[in-house]
Image (tube, grey):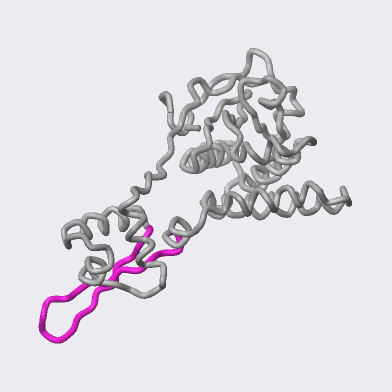
Amino acid sequence: MAICTPSLAERSSVAELRPVDRDLLLALRGGEALGVGALTDRLGVTATAIRQRVERLLSMGLIEREKVVAGRGRPTFLYRLTVAGHRRSGADPAELADAMWEAILAMPDSAERERLLSAVGERLGRQYADLLSRGDSEGAEHLAERFERLSELLSQRQVESGVSRWGDLPVLDVGSCPYPSMTEASGDRAMCKLEEKMFSEALGQPVHLSSCRLDGDACCQFAPVAAVDRGLGGDEAVEVKGSGGDPGPG
């Protein structure tokens, strides 16, 4: 097997949401656009405090600003939630996701369950593929770029990841399960199969889970099928620059 990228560590760019910022998001959940004055009244804090929170949330992409010009006076600004803001301000979907996962695993028809898992993995993979897409080149360098950018996206989602190499082919190293509670709930490694499908769809290249932490390996590795066919492993495995380099996500 290829050598796992050294020091896989968290390289997350997902900023922590402060309680005071969450209060402002909750004030905007009704869907109406509000100005600083209205937010000051609702939250009972100073206009300066509101403006500080607004600037943070604008930089995080959780709210958007609308300029309003009325008469000959100075323009004012109204704020509303973005799609990302609605997601961050809503209820934690973890319980719902866990319940749905358990229902899928309990399906008596194994063939139907496999089809559903494959469809979920494919849909998730397409979302990553949309973010990774940069033209139609399918050369080896392009594939390595996609591995690197996928690792970066995973890191942004607090999934420990990096990229190593087997010969001239990249290998995705995943140091922590993206969905640990769901992985533990599955006795037949259904989540591993789903991730294999998801990464294959995201990369536009069939990949195989060539090593797995559940088997005691240092990390899970997803390698192009071509690398698996050539016998992934041995001294030819070398490190390539991961998406974060120094000790960093998880």
Where is residue 79 shown, x and y percent of the image? 30, 68
Judge whether 199 appears above or below 96 on screen.
above
* Left or right for 87, reference 192: left
Membership of 118 in magenta stretch: no
User: Which residue is at 75% across, 40% downward?
Assistant: 190
The outermost residue toward the left is: 73
The outermost residue toward the bottom is: 71
What is the quadrant of residue 163 in the picture? top right
* Left or right for 68, reference 174: left
| Residue 19 seen from this side | yes
Name the residue nearer the viewer: 207 or 139: 207
Give the residues drawn in magenta, as a range: 62-84
Judge whether 157 appears above or below 90 on screen.
above
| Residue 136 seen from this side | no
Membership of 65 in magenta stretch: yes
Name the residue nearer the viewer: 223 or 24: 24
